Image (cartoon, rainbow, N blue to C red):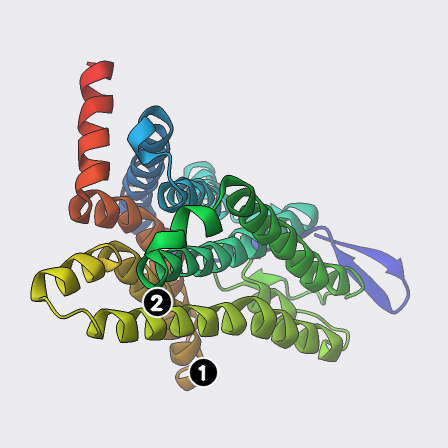
Amino acid sequence: FIHMESANHTRTSKFLLLGFSAKLEIQLILFGLFLSMYLVTFTGNLLIILAVSSDSHLHTPMYFFLSNLSFVDICFTSTTIPKMLVNIQMQSRSILYEGCLTQIFFFIVFGCLDNLLLTVMAYDRFVAICHPLNYMVIMNPQLCILLVLGSWCLSVMGSLAELLPLLRLSFCTHIEIPHFFCDPPEVLKLACSDTFINNIVVYLVTGFLAFIPFSGILFSYSQIAFSVLTISSAGGKYKAFSTCGSHLSVISLFYGTGFGVYLSSAAIPSSRKNMMASVMYTLVTPMLNPFIYSLRNRDIKGALGRLLRRAA
């Protein structure tokens, strides 16, 4: 697995992903479970994209951002789950060094994109509720495209900022990653060389692309709450909050699982608990998003019904 670059510098050609269990019976159960969840995630999010693109009533900023979020969720899940399924099927645990770096790059890109798109959607809801008369003027098509493109650019730059310092690291002969994918913190732990710069970059990127957007979401919803409280009728308040219900549920799920992973790994450093928590935000959250939006949203339900009838 290792080839020497110099007398005191090693570069690994492969990593070993230890995954959940070495027992064949458990692996077969996990294969069935994760394949089913992945197919549900892929199909559910694809249906949202098709429903939004095929229904002219849904060609609005909110649904434009939702279809982008669904696309990103498909990509986010596809970064880690297919490789794990292939490894179980082939009874192999290895991943090439280049494959590991590629997985890290796309994992960070789509993780950051999820974050930024949820922030953009919160801003969209803020404009819709706090400035309803100017909504279509402010949220014009040019701004919507610009917000999505800006999210992509920031995510790619953030990912490259974390990935490029990884390239200078050398890795020891112990190359087992106690995870089902190349989780960046777990990969950093395997490095023989100093990871101080890497850790600084991780904190800076996380602060810029996670905590600042989260602060934006909190600000948007605080303004929405103040605006809704000024509405005198109970029906008006319910209508205003109902437009945010699905988005709030998705935000709670995404950030709840994300912070859960961070806090559980900080409090109890257990690789198995980290893996279980990671499944929540890499697979369960993207899988549930289409259900949350289709069950709580009459427009999406109607569009999905029309789409399926046309297909039938």
Circle 1: element type:
helix
The image shows residue 203 at horizontal and vertical percentages of 62, 76
Q: How far apart are the alpha carbons under marks 2 and 1? A: 14 Å
Nearest to N terminus: mark 2 or mark 1: 2
Q: Which mark is residue 172?
A: none
User: 129 or 36, which lies in front?
Assistant: 129
Q: Amino acid at mark 1?
A: Ala
User: Who's the residue at 41% across and 74% down the image?
Assistant: 219
Give the labeled residue for mark 1: 266
Label 2–label 1 contact, CB within 8 A: no
Q: Is residue 132 left or right of residue 195?
A: left
From this viewpoint, which residue is outermost toward the right?
6
Nearest to viewer (mark 2 / mark 1) = 2
The secondary element bearing badge 2 is classed as: helix
Is residue 19 rendered to the left or right of residue 129?
right
In percent of width and height, residue 215 lies at 46, 74
Q: Residue furthest bottom?
A: 267
Q: Which residue is mark 2?
A: 257
- Residue at 52% in and 49% down: 93
Residue 262, horizontal then vertical, whole percent = 44, 75
Residue at the image position 61 percent from the left and 65 percent from the top: 187
Callout 2 crowding tier (Cα within 10 Å): few <14, some 14–19, many ≥20: many
